Image: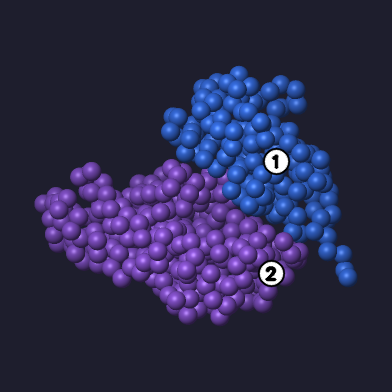
Amino acid sequence: MKNFAYLRAASLAEAQQAAARPATMLLAGGTTLIDLAKCDIAAPETMVDITHLAGLDTIALDEQGVSIGALARMSWVADDPGIRRHFPAISEALWQAASAQLRNMATIGGNLMQRTRCPYFRDPAAFPACNKRRPGSGCAAIGGVTRNHAVLGTSPSCIATYPGDLAVALVAFDAEIDLGTRRVAIDDFFLLPGTTPDREHAMEPGEVITAIHVPASPAARRSTYLKVRDRQSYEFAAASAAVGLELAPDGRTIADIRVALGGVATKPWRARAVEQALKGKALTAESVERAAPTAVEGAVDHGGHRYKIDLAPRVVARAILAVGGLA
Amino acid sequence: MSDPTISMQLEVNQRVHTLRLEPRVTLLDALREHLGLTGTKKGCDQGQCGACTVHVDGARVLACLTLAAQVQGRPVTTIEGLSSNGGDLHPVQAAFLEHDAFQCGYCTPGQIMSAVACIREGHAGSDAEIREYMSGNLCRCGAYPNIVVAVRQAAEDLR
């Protein structure tokens, strides 16, 4: 790890000024940044610690929804009674992410800023080619071992899988990212790799996440996060689904449904085709199983991760049936 | 070249230490290399194994992904500071001994620091919950069954 200057921001304004300076990075929980610094991928000249800023770590719930301060820790949000009652998918996505220690360290804002990364990205000594690290240098993953790489949202420049869980639940329920002076819909906040995989977030220099707002909805209240993986805990998703469901007063017609995928795409992936196929239909095992394959429309198989194309629709179907009380 | 070190005060096990360290020094290296507290172990040094688990502000965290500079003003507890007077074993330590919850012992300080927090958080209610909330501590000897028994026993003793 290259040495750097360490500063503490005394105010949000100071953090924003720091975020506008070149070779300067904001440091919150550090669970990704310190790791990437050790891998010689992040090498800022200055790290500005923002964890001591006051007033940015609250969780405020009302009828409209919830506002989660950027410095709230993952573990606090996972265990928050209001989140668990009104947004169970968010709580479940959080407690199934990382480990208890990492969840105590990592902030909600930092979680959204974690790099989309793959084993090739993390190993610059062995794999110099990475369009994310060095734009234009190529992609060592394409043609390599791709078992855990993305099948959706890829480009010839990058096929790294978005690794987070929280944002998958947030994208299902139309969260907004508060950047202090403007709010960005979460689906627009995360960028597809395209020809610029080095740019992952729709943020400008000097912008700092201050909070995340999630609107309340019946679908968010009746929701779940199903994460399927190679080991039972402390592992990235092979495929995951955040699902929310609202039934009409007849108890069987789907009035509203939200579906988002993790572990299979280059960004948190809203599966709108599944939602469209089911909205207004009766909730039955048949209708769900017919709609689920549309979750992977447009998937590209690079070999090795072909199983994700089969797995993701099954995870979607199981999550919908579980939240609908049919499984 | 100017001095790359900065002065910092760290409160570890209720003692305040003043150190001059480079900002890049992790809490783990500060504990082991500069304060001689080698009970906290360096396993992967990448946030994947849990051997370096300590408490900061009472919460379990990974010392390998925490900068020493970040914990100025935040009390740190390591395995050496777990028992109140340095003599008697903490109930979790006693349970690990009683149930043979280790083989080589390298992961054990991290397991114990994690287990103390796991019980305090209220996440030791069942064997399944203990396994889930202890999953950030790897044991390459595979002592997991006895670790779960020890944590369950300690949780009962501390109730």
Q: Which chain does tag 1 point to?
A: B
In the displayed structure image, the side of residue A243 where residue B6 appears, left or right: right
Q: CA distance from mark 2 to mark 1?
A: 27 Å
Looking at the image, residue B40 lies above or below residue A244: above
Residue that numbered label 1 is attached to:
B41
Q: Quarter of the image containing the C terminus of chain A?
A: top left
Residue at mark 2: A44
**Residue visible at 56% across and 49% down in the picture:** A102
Mark 2 belongs to which amino acid?
Pro
Q: Is residue A49 left or right of residue B144?
A: right
Q: Tag 1: residue type? A: Lys
Residue B150: where, in percent of width, then height?
55, 25
Position of residue A171 relative to residue A221, above or below, is below
Q: Which mark is in front, 2 or 1?
A: 1
Q: Residue furthest left?
A: A250
Shade of chain B as shown in the rendered figure: blue
Helix, strand or loop for disc 2 = loop
Name the quadrant of the N terminus of chain A.
bottom right
Which residue shows up at 59% across the image and 59% down it? A32
In the depicted view, which residue is nearer to us: B110 or A254? B110
